[in-house]
Amino acid sequence: MKIVIVTWANNSEKTIARTIKSVLSQSYQNFIYYIIDNASIDHTKDIIHDYASIDSRIVPIDKPQNDKWVFFKILPKILERCGADDYICNIDADDEYQSDFFLKMLKFIQKNHLDIGICGSEIVNSETNNIVGTRKLNTDMIIQQEGFNYYLQYYYQFMRTIWGKMFSASVLLKSNFLPNSQMSFYGIDTLFNIEAFTCSKRIGILSETLHKYYISRKSISYQFDIHRFQSDKVLFDRAAKFLADKCGYISKQNYYFLLSVYLYEIRDTVNVLLDSQVNDKVKLDYLHRIFSDYRTKKINQITYPEVVYDRQKLYSQLTEWIYDKEIEPSIVNIANMADILAVMGVYPTHVKNWETCYVFLLLINIRNQTKNEFQLNENENVIRLVTSKEKILSRLNVDFLSYFSEISFLVLQHKETNVLKKIEGIIESNQNIPVEYIDDFLHLGLDIAAELELSGDFIYLKKIRIKVLIDCSRISDAKAELDNWDELMPTDKDFQMFRKILDDPEQKK
C-alpha cells in the first residue's frame, strides 16, 4: 500500500522546503512524492531538484509554461501508475503535515473501510505564523448512504478544499474529473471534491488536526477574476445535483443550507471585487451580474437569524458603496443599480451627485422589479418623498408617476415645455391611455399650460377633456368643464358642438 503525494509550486522558494520536509519526516515511509515546478522564475525548481537528488521517492516534474490547471492535467497520468490499494494526497507548496499524518489517516481509513479520509486543519497566517482558526469536528464521523443527507452541514466545509485529505486512487480513477474552463480557478477544489464524493460510498472525518494550511492575501482566493462568479453559480448547482444524485432528493433544510453557502461565496466574491483595482463602472456591471441572477434572489428566502444578519451586513456594505461612488446616471447604470437595490430591498432618497430626476428614475426601475407588497409600499413612500417638492407631481399617485415616468422625469428636470409637447404628442398619436389615468393626465397638461401661460395649449387640452368626459358619459362633469367657455368663446365651433351634445345627448349619435 503506497501513498502518492502531489504538490505543484510556482515561485515558492520561501516555503517549498517546509512542505517537502513535512512529507519526508512522516512516520509512514512507503510513499512517492511528485513535485511539479510550474514555470517558477525564482529558485523553486532548484530546491525541488536538490531534494530529489537525495531522496529517490521525490519525482520532480518541470513545466516550462505556467498552467493553473497543471495538477488536474497531470493527475490522470499519475493515477495510471497507481495500484488499486494506493492513496492520493495533495499538499500546497506552503503547507505542512504533522509527522503522523500518513500513519493515522491510513489506520482511520482501513479501520472504517473508507474511500476518502479527512482530517482537521489548523489555519495559519503566513505572515505572522499565528494560528487564526481550526477546521475540525469534535468527534470522528463516518458518512454513508442516508448520512450524506443528514450530515451535509458537518461535512460540506471539508468539501471546499483538496488539502487535508487522503483519496483512494481507485475512486479518483472512477471520478473522471475535468476542469470547467469557464470557472475561476477559485472553487475548482470544491468541484473536484464533489466529483470524488459522488463516486465514494464511505467517507470519514477524523477529529484530529494533522495538517497546517497557511493563508496569504496573495493567494488566488484574494485575486479578482472575471470568472469567479461563474464558479459560485457552478458550485451551488453542482452541490445541489450531488445531493439529488446521492440521496435521491434535497431536503428543504439542505437547500437553505446550500443557499447560505452561496451567500457567503458571493459575499467573498463581492469583497474581492470591491478591493480590486478595476474601475467603478466595471464593478457595478459585475455586481449587476451577481444580483440579477436567480440564485442570488433566492437568498432572501433564508430565515436563519445568523444568516439574515450576515445577509443584511452584505447589503449594507453594498448600499454604502453605491451611495459613496460617483457613478454616472446613464440608462444602463440606472437599470443595473435598480436590479441590485431591488434584490436588497433598498430605496435611496439620494445618490452622490445625482439630480432628483435620476433618483426618481432609479426608484421607478426598482419598483418595476419589486413584487412584495410591503416593499412596494416602502418604495411608494420614498417616491412620494422624492417628488414631494414638485407641486404638480405631489398630488399624483405613484402608479401614475410610474406609468408616465418619462413625463414625470421631465417635470423633475423643470422642462415644462417638453412635458407639454409630450402630452400633446400622446394625444395626437391616439396612444392608448388607461382609463384610470386619463383625468390626471389631462389635469397635468392643463396645469402646465396654465403655469406657462400658453392659452392656446390650455384651450386645446380643455376641449380634449370635455370630449373625453362626454365619451365616458360623465355629463355633469362635462357641463362643469364647459361652463363659461361657450360664453367666453361663443363662435368656437368645438364649444358650440359640446353644448349641443350636452343639451341634447341624441346629438352625440
Image (spheres, grey):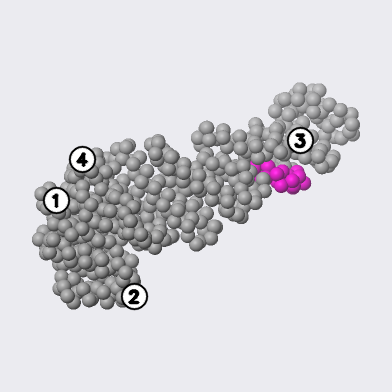
- The segment highlighted magenta reads 404-421
Q: Is residue 315 left or right of residue 387?
A: left
Q: Look at the image and say whether residue 254 sits in the magenta stretch.
A: no
Element class at badge 1: helix
* Residue at figure coordinates x 39%, y 50% from the top left: 265
Q: Nearer the viewer, residue 503 or 303?
A: 303
Q: Is residue 39 visible?
A: no
* Spatial CA span between label 2 and label 3: 83 Å
Q: Which residue is tagged 1?
A: 108
Amino acid type, label 1: Phe
Nearer-N-terminus badge (2/3): 2
Amino acid type, label 2: Asp
* Front of the two marks 3 and 1: 1
At label 4, counting other C-alpha atoms closer than 10 Å, the crowd grade (few under 14, some 14-19, many 20 or more) is: few
Q: Position of residue 274 (x, y in %)?
A: 48, 55
Q: Is residue 410 left or right of residue 106?
A: right
Nearer-N-terminus badge (3/1): 1
Q: Nearer the viewer, residue 273 or 124?
A: 124
Q: Provide the major secondary structure of the magenta segment.
A: helix
Q: Nearer the viewer, residue 142 or 15?
A: 15
Q: Which residue is tagged 3?
A: 464
Q: Position of residue 234 (x, y in %)?
A: 35, 52
* Spatial CA span between label 4 and label 2: 49 Å
Q: Position of residue 89 (x, y in %)?
A: 21, 60
Q: Are marks 1 and 2 in contact (CB under 8 Å)?
A: no
* Residue at figure coordinates x 9%, y 61% from the top left: 1
